[in-house]
Image: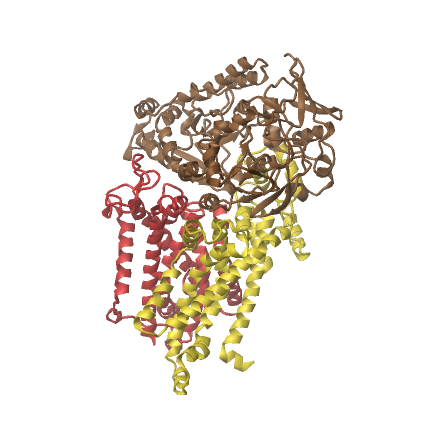
Amino acid sequence: MTRRPLRPRFVAFGSSTLLLSGLISGCSSSSGAAESGGSTPVQGGTITYAHVQEPSCIFGGWIQQAYISRQILDGLVTEDDNGAIKPWLATAWTVSPDGLSYTFTLKSGVKFTDGTPVDAAAIAWNFDLWENHSGNASAKVSMDPYYKSAKALDPTHVKITLNKPFPQFLRLITQGYYGIQSPTAFKSRTRQENCEKPIGSGAFKVKQWKRGEEVVLVKNPNYTSWPATAKHHGPAIVNEVDWKFVADGVSRYASLTTGQANVVYQVPTSNWTDAQQKYQPIRFITPGKPVSFNLNTKQGVFTDKLVRQAFAYGADRKAAVKAGFHGVIPYEGNPALDQATPDYNAQAAQAYPFDQAKANALLDRAGWRKGAAGIRTKNGKRLTVRLVYGSGYVLTKEGETVLQILQEQWKQTGFEVKLIPATQAEGFSGKYSSPSTYDATPEYWCNSSPAVLWIVWRPTTKAAPNYNNESFYNNDQLAKTIQQANTEQDTAKAGQLYQKAQQVVQDNAVSIGLYPQTSLYAVAKNLKNVWLEKSQGEPVFSDAYFTK
Amino acid sequence: MTVSPLPTAGARLVRLDRLRIRPSTAVSLIVVLWVLLATIAPDLLTNRSPTAIDLGGTMQAPSWNHPFGTDQAGRDLFTRVIYGARQSMGIGLGATALAMVIAVLLGFTAGLAGGFLDAVITRVVEVTFAFPALLLALLVISVRGPSQATELIAVGIGSAPGYARMVRGQVLNVRQAAYIEAAAALGHNRWTVIRQHLFPNAMRPLVAVMTLGIGQSVVWASSLSFLGLGVPPPSSEWGALLDAGREYITTSWWLEILPGLVIIVVALAATSLGRTLQHKLEGAAS
Amino acid sequence: MVIAAASLTFLAQLLMPGDRATALMNVQTGQQKRWTAAELAPVNKEFGFDRPLPVQYLHYLGGLFRGDLGTSYTQHRPVTQVIGGQLAPTLILTLGALVTAWVLAVAITVLTVKRTRAVSALGSTWEALTASLPNYWVGVVLLVVFAVKLPLFPVIGGSNAWGTVLPLATLAIPLAGFLGQVTRDELEKVLDQPFVTTARTRGMSDTAVRLRHALRHAVLPAITLSGWALGALVSGAIITENIFARPGIGQVLVTAVNTRDVPTVSGIVLVVAVAYVVANLLVDVAYALVDPRLRGRS
């Protein structure tokens, strides 16, 4: 592979605004400004943001933590709206021809908010923390097993060495899990302090965490390390962000309509039309594996491919998603990757349209005959599907509606689908993680790269079980294809391989697509320049300003 | 909020002709009978299916065709409420029965044994009585996972201490009554006395309290469902309906308001009946 | 008694499916899968899950005596701090609701008992109606009517005074109905008592009779129920805090149960147990102050 020297490109109010124009509809500034009384930018102020879930710590491997840690911690690189990797803490980088080592040049003079420098040693220490010291399980699983070591060459150059070429590496480390923390602070402070007030070099720092209510973020006046995708240069324009936790959807949206919040996350889909008319709506489809039903291929009715395919044909998933989410969230027919992920296979997404005749024929062929009350049986066994889903934390109320609609349709083809909600406690405890506990389970995995295929579909071996493979599906051809794709340095070839892998997943119907994980934000009209990080859709407030 | 644990005096047999029926009692009776009918034979009250979806007719406001409107999957809410009665009342009745069994065991043991055993049971009952029932239910649910049976057990255990207190009080009360002492003095076997005299007389006033309790158990169970810890979908247990409707209260009010009114009316009717019974029994006793 | 409560919770949490290290790893990564032994080992070591259960239990009990409730598995800070920060809003909410409920109940009963048929019926219907209202439904309706449609109160008021009004009303209204029903029954009986008639014949005004003589007797059963009511209010607080996004013990508890944060759950149970003991003492004191017979004796 050729060297790719990438110069830092700081574009003020330039091409990066494309991100917003693509996502925001109906927010032409003229009407918005007229309603809110003007368009004069104001320095200072407090943004009140209503989020949904409160994490246990600000930093960690859960996407809920990535949302907030993005405000406090900076990453090494970021991604622009077109999917190109752009500078952040690293101003430039080179990749060795064999694809095994990445040398990053760091922006000089950047300091953590504890005053210590963001130098090469600090970066190397963070990589070591993620990989070897349980620093962040999601960061680890994204670069495992390609990551080998990180080494500071001099204060402004850090070299990351890989075991195998892995071009997706750069895209993966744009995710919020890879926020750089101050090693000095991390090592010298208590675990509690690190949990509540991680020290980074970001545009904001944690002032106070009122548990159960809000995290108060104040601006970092000495901020110098904005990403290339930023919309202005300099510290945050507002003084404070009150990051509130409002679990109830009605209250959350009402906090915006009554003017108590300026930005809300996850607008209930039934309020989306209203939000589009009154506010600046931002709909973000999170890349990665969409919400799709992982079918248990090891035990039970879905060990038979014909039954899996019949399951896919048997219900009008598109119509169910449309009804459940009031047409706001799109249907996703590709179970392996969603439409926002690079190298998405749009062709594969078309498979298994709603066709009950086909479903019936497949089930007949598989030997399942219609019995009492229309439920099929075979050798005296009923065609029962235990569908376990994380209630409230994997699927929202809207998602549960989709399941109930599907359940009714599956019944018409002779499936007896039992919906089994798992509480968060049960989900976390791993109660529904072994092959004997479910037949189908909807799950998603947010990830900015098609390399997520390896996380989900890596076959289980005795030495290294893959518990993320919830279909318990071991397919060597699939594994080989993904591995080839991950190490392929020719972008076009890699893309073809990723697409092939998605096709294999779809052909075998080991998972059935439903909808992509989607974020719905609404921003008050007098607040400008709120934008979303491309990798996971975290809101960015450092460029935002109020108008009057 | 929950049962009225009023200390009630022992009572003699109530004769039906003494139950002068007031209009409010009559209405309550009708409501309760209607709910019982919905519980036993929901198909007599509606010819629709509670799970039949109609994606072309979602979120319709109440009309002649759909008196309670339709939900986000186009299901008829009135039908869902009717069919939900079985689950809600099943939990209400089951939980009250379970609570009573526990209460009778504890209450009689404490009331009859006296001494150390009484002290221990009384203390345990006192503590669990004040212990937030919802917390107890949360613990039960996190051990067993959400299901109709779990909900029944959680509500039953949660309301048992209140009844146990009353049962013990009644036992102590009745024990001192003259006819019990007389029976004992006549040399009747201890168990016979308990079975033939003590038990029926101690339990009679509790019939009213149980009637009160059923309504309250329904409300309780719906609270758990409201927290998303109740009966799994597509059940139309009333609390589950409220839980699903909460999100639409500003856009499709009927999904939250109408099932809520149904719960209130039923709880009100059960309470009213229970209190009428209680008054009559007290009246009969004095 | 307090220790028994803590021990029970400790055991109940251990009865839950799955092991704690798995739950912790999943909480930290937002997943619901199994982990390999190698991945779990550091967690087990850190929290001492690898030690035998009796040792863990004794260690926990030992801490209790030193006033140490342990460290939260998920928040990495002492449980005393986790609870301490959330205790005040819940106390304000529950005690405030209790007081409000009492004021409402007494006012309505005194004003409506044994008046004209219509007024009495109005009072008792109001009580029966409010007593049947499920907390959560009241909360949602109040929120929508008084915070969303008529923006009189904040939707996300946190724990400030103005934001406390609606949550407080949510808890107080059904409780007032319940206390009112109990008090009404007693008041009706008491007003028929001979000593009331005597007081009236001495020329005492109706209001004075109600307030100075009858009420004193009539509130006794409701006072005994107040200890219980506090427990019920804590249940209600869990729901109310959820609806109004209000910080407090209820929210912490639900999260802790969900994440299997054993020390935090046990800690909260302990605090509730202690609160109950205190509440019962207060109830006894109140009883003694109000009951004329007991007062005469002391």
Q: Is residue B8 visible?
A: no
Q: Quadrant of residue A272?
A: top left
Using residue A210 as the reference point, say whether residue C167 is left or right of it.
Answer: left
The image quadrant where one finds the N terminus of chain A is top right
Using residue C67 as the reference point, say whether residue C251 is left or right of it.
Answer: left
Q: Is residue B160 visible?
A: yes
> Taking A419 as reference, is C15 above or below it?
below
Residue in the foreground of this view, choosing between C236 and B235: C236
- Please identify which colour was used for chain C in the image: yellow
Question: Residue C262: x, y in percent?
Answer: 58, 48
Query: The chain coloured brown carries which letter?
Result: A
> Taking A457 as reference, is B159 above or below it?
below
Residue lying farthest bottom? C202
Question: Residue A274: x, y in percent?
Answer: 41, 39
- Please identify which colour was used for chain B in the image: red
> Taking B277 as reference, is A347 above or below it?
above
